[in-house]
Image (cartoon, rainbow, N blue to C red):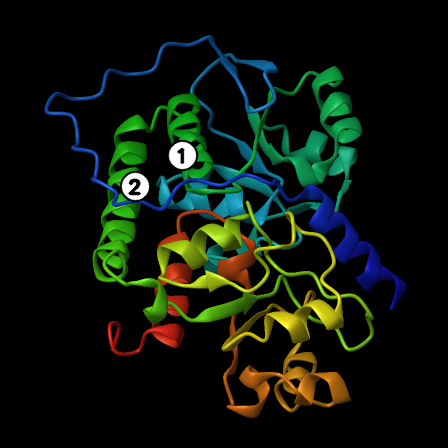
Amino acid sequence: MEARYIIITALLVAAIVAVCGCTTVTPTASPATPTPAAQYPMTVMDYYGRTATIDKAPERIVSLSAANTELLFDLGLGSKIVGVDDYSDYPAEAKAITKVSGFAEVSYEKITAVDPDVIFAEDIVGEEAVTRLREMGFPVVEVKNSNLTMIRKSIELFGRVTDTSANATALIDKIDREIAAINAKTAGLNESQKPNVLLLTGFLISSPQIYPYGSGTYGDELLTLTGCKNAAGDVLGYQVMSNEAIIKADPDYIVIPVDGVMCTMDDYNYFKNGNETWMKSLTAVKNGKVFWVDGNLFLRPGPRTPQAGLDLARIVHPELFP
């Protein structure tokens, strides 16, 4: 049980408090001329302002986060990935790739064995591990995929490093079109048409603390995009929300990502059925408006973010998203 608490704490600390305005998105037009080939050696700057020099077009890639693994596959680089973290399970092909790291725990021996040309990491890996990998001579590119703007920047950067910029542009265009399609249906809603929604990062029967997507978070961005009010809007970032605060907010809907770690189906059903006295008083519980969603979509900001938005929109606005 202690391990689950550690996972929750680490995930929430790792999350960025950043927000991208969910105004109407105009898809970026693809360039009319072919993208020039990348020039190597190439030196790039990552999210943290650190530089990495890549000697040649990468043929052997390590991904230390599930979100980055999905992104790399979407760029057509699946066959070049030689190492991933334990949680990289999408697409299905990722499950067969050598596992070189656990949760905030890196196997330097395994990474050395697969001998990558570049390593793509997120902050969950930890500064100590990233520093050591660099000292070992591996170029490490670290990103944060905590909102739509940062997701686009990560895709562009990955495309540049791997000489797949044309694919990166096409992927960004696809994401923008899908986001715009959702926004087109929700942008005209007035305040009275926007339900009050509590979107959680997860829920565990074993944990006395509840962490919502508060103001300025990735989930807050999704709620705005899908035409909702954030019932945790008074909570800054990923801080704890007390039972009393949830009762006061009295959400119309409660949405819980289920991924088997941050929340299991047993945990979800416990909340849905109002198994604690305070839960029974909530409008969402009384009206049967507690829903679960695919945790991997909501807890891994990346190319499937539009699908997360669509799944949420279908719950809260079924009249607009049949």
User: For residue 171, which numbered disc appears in the image?
Assistant: 2
Relative vertical location of residue 46 with respect to residue 317 in this rendering, above or below: above
Looking at the image, residue 180 sits to the left or right of residue 317; the answer is left
- Amino acid on which the number 1 mark rests in the picture: Ile
Tell me the crowding category of disc 2: few under 14, some 14 to 19, or many 20 or more residues within 10 angstroms, Cα based: many
Q: Position of residue 110 (x, y in %)?
A: 73, 38
Q: Position of residue 254 (x, y in %)?
A: 55, 75
Q: Give the SS element for disc 1.
A: helix
How many numbered markers are drawn? 2
Q: Which residue does the numbered mark 1 point to in the structure image?
A: 155
Labels 2 and 1 touching (C-beta < 8 A): yes
User: For residue 67, which numbered disc appears in the image?
Assistant: none
Relative vertical location of residue 297 with respect to residue 136 in this rendering, above or below: below
Figure quadrant of residue 185: bottom left
Relative vertical location of residue 78 with respect to residue 62 in this rendering, above or below: below
Q: Is residue 317 visible?
A: yes
Work out which quarter of the rendered image holds the N terminus and state it: bottom right
Towards the viewer: 217 or 73: 217
Relative vertical location of residue 276 with respect to residue 91 in this rendering, above or below: below
Image point 43% across, 29% down: which residue? Answer: 158
Figure quadrant of residue 211: bottom right
- Amino acid on which the number 2 mark rests in the picture: Leu
Q: Position of residue 15 (x, y in %)?
A: 64, 44
Q: Residue furthest left?
A: 32
Image point 75% across, 16% down: which residue? Answer: 135
Q: Is residue 102 visible?
A: no
Towards the viewer: 64 or 295: 295
Image point 71% across, 29% down: which residue? Answer: 112
